[in-house]
Image (tube, grey):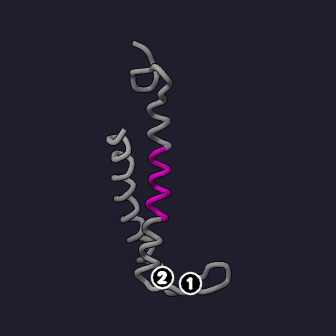
Amino acid sequence: MLRLTLSILWPAFIAAGIGLGIIFTLVDPMELVVLGEHVRASRSAIYSLGFFVLWAITAMAAAMSAFLLTGKHPGDKTLGGEGD
């Protein structure tokens, strides 16, 4: 279980870092507007929040992919739930 969790979180961490680099290369965090108001936070806080949001999104996508690939059912011991 720990191995599966780390197999999901590590690629999601890398993808979030790349995504954050791309997004904030194009967008200045001090010019963000949410619900008609400028975001009143430091650049570091915006970068951190953006990273964790992207990490959560990519981790959920990776977890859904892992779930669909394994297709485990109670009692199954093979990948994909297919018997030998």
Where on the picture, by quarter, is residue 15?
bottom left
Q: Earlier in the sequence, mark 1 or mark 2?
A: 2
Query: Which residue lies at the image location 38% right of the left edge and 45% below the top edge?
Result: 5
| Number of numbered labels in the structure image | 2
Q: Quadrant of residue 19?
A: bottom left
Q: Amino acid at mark 1?
A: Val
Q: Position of residue 1 (x, y in %)?
A: 37, 38
* Crowd rating for badge 1 (residues with CA inside 10 Å; few <14, some 14–19, many 20+): some
Is 35 on the left-hand or right-hand side of 49?
right
Q: Main secondary structure of the magenta part?
A: helix
Q: Which mark is residue 29?
A: 2
Residue 7 spot, x, y in % from top left: 34, 45
Residue 3 in the image: state x and y as whole percent.
32, 41
Q: Are marks 1 and 2 in contact (CB under 8 Å)?
A: yes
Q: Dot 2 lies on which element?
A: helix
Specify few, some or many for label 2: CA neighbours under 10 Å numbering under 14, 14-19, or 20 or more: many
| Magenta-highlighted residues | 53-63
Q: Quadrant of the C terminus?
A: top left
**As displayed, is residue 77 above or below residue 50?**
above
